[in-house]
Image (cartoon, rainbow, N blue to C red):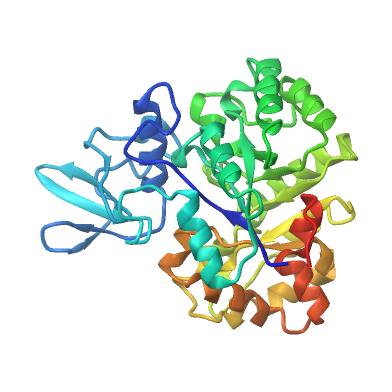
């Protein structure tokens, strides 16, 4: 079975994204675009520029850094804003996202063409917080799609029981199979990012009771504003994952995206320090790592990206082929690689593995974790 462990569907990004206040959704979107590496340009002549005016470059990962520039979703995968009468553009999505929405039908059509059997829909607030929207996607394609539940992380410290009840209701829906947890959302609401601390304990107790897997996207952005080397920042987040797993030994945890590959680019290779590998709770058999090389590095290294093969070998040495999970970040990843190339690429850089082991990485491990039976 070919299972894409990291895909997206989202509603119209010009709407409210499931927020009670559309302005709150816009803030999440604007900050996400302001801090993203995709290039921007001046609309009237396509002259390259920086993210002029979107946010204070020294303002860090904070809503307070945002500027009032009439930021808005446009069309064909772009966002626009206006500074001193000039309109600026950032191409975040691929141009085929014409109306700034990506429904389940679009995802499944890409899966059909690329030969992907199933996909897991991930979550982030700037693509919407509605669990109902994701549940509807999985309900329309129950044999092709599964989804993760998102509970607003910033509400957990003050209402852990209510947050748990929201999670419990959402995972009762068919196809909703786990929790997406994003620590970097917490400091946006002026709260401590100690997500393994006592304020979160009742919530995590409830998650453990439900017995669902947790997909954690570590908070490299917010920690980086506090100083420290890239290795120290990534290692710190991985140690927090280890702390959570030590407290709940029966909890399955997947670190999404990988090990912040982009910050470790060194010429034609990835130079990931030993402290990062050592910080992974690799001795815990319930810990897994997603492999999303193309979304992070596709603008740096062309297909098939042989530069990451040595890193792949190091990961197999640490975790084994049975705890590595391929994912893509579709549709965003198609900025760089086609969906077919994403699958061919991960097979190419795993060519030192047996066919059976490659099958685990490209879907078998994700399917097993989420209880999917297939060939």
Quarter the C terminus occupies: bottom right
Residue 14 shown left or right of residue 373 in the figure: left
Q: Is residue 51 above or below residue 110?
A: above
Q: Is residue 251 visible?
A: yes
Q: Residue at x 65, y 30 (%)?
A: 170
Q: Nearer the viewer, residue 234 or 22?
A: 22
Q: Determine which quarter of the picture holds residue 350.
A: bottom right
The x, y position of residue 94, in whole percent, is: 37, 61
Residue 332 shown left or right of residue 85 in the figure: right
Q: Is residue 266 visible?
A: no
The x, y position of residue 151, in whole percent, is: 61, 29
Q: Nearer the viewer, residue 225 or 53?
A: 53
The x, y position of residue 255, in whole percent, is: 70, 51
Q: Nearer the viewer, residue 83 or 255?
A: 255
Q: Residue at x 27, y 40 (%)?
A: 72
Q: Is residue 283 above or below residue 26?
A: below
Q: Residue at x 81, y 56 (%)?
A: 368
The x, y position of residue 229, in whole percent, is: 60, 54
Quarter the N terminus occupies: bottom right
Residue 55 shown left or right of residue 252 in the figure: left
Q: Is residue 179 above or below residue 93?
A: above
Q: Residue at x 42, y 34 (%)?
A: 17
Count of labels shown? 0
């Amino acid at each position: 079975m070919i299972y894409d462990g990291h895909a997206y569907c989202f509603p119209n990004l010009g709407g409210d994204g499931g927020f009670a206040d559309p302005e709150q959704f816009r803030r999440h979107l604007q900050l996400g675009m302001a801090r993203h590496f995709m290039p921007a340009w001046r609309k009237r002549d396509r002259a390259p520029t920086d993210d002029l005016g979107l946010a204070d470059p020294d303002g860090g990962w904070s809503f307070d850094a945002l500027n009032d520039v009439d930021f808005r979703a446009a069309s064909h995968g772009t966002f626009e804003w206006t500074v001193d009468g000039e309109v600026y553009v950032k191409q975040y999505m691929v141009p085929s996202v014409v109306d700034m929405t990506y429904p389940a039908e679009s995802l499944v059509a890409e899966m059909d063409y690329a030969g992907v059997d199933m996909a897991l829909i991930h979550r982030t607030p700037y693509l919407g917080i509605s669990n109902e929207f994701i549940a509807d996607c999985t309900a329309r394609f129950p044999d092709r799609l599964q989804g993760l539940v998102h509970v607003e992380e910033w509400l957990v410290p003050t209402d852990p029981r209510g947050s748990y009840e929201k999670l419990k209701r959402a995972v009762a829906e068919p196809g909703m199979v786990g929790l997406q947890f994003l620590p970097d959302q917490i400091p946006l609401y002026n709260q401590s990012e100690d997500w393994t601390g006592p304020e979160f304990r009742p919530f995590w107790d409830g998650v453990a009771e439900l017995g669902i897997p947790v997909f954690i996207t570590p908070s490299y952005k917010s920690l980086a504003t506090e100083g420290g080397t890239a290795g120290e920042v990534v290692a710190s987040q991985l140690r927090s994952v280890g702390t959570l797993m030590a407290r709940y030994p029966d909890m399955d945890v997947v670190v999404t995206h990988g090990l912040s590959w982009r910050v470790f680019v060194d010429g034609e290779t990835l130079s990931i320090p030993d402290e990062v590998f050592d910080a992974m709770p690799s001795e815990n058999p319930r810990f897994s790592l997603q492999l999303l090389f193309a979304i992070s590095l596709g603008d740096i290294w062309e297909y098939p990206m042989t530069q990451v093969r040595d890193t792949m070998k190091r990961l197999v040495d640490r975790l084994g082929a049975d705890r590595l999970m391929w994912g893509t970040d579709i549709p965003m990843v198609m900025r760089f690689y086609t969906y077919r190339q994403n699958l061919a690429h991960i097979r190419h850089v795993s060519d030192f593995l047996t066919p059976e082991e490659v099958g685990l990485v490209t879907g078998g491990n994700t399917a097993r974790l989420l209880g999917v039976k297939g060939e």
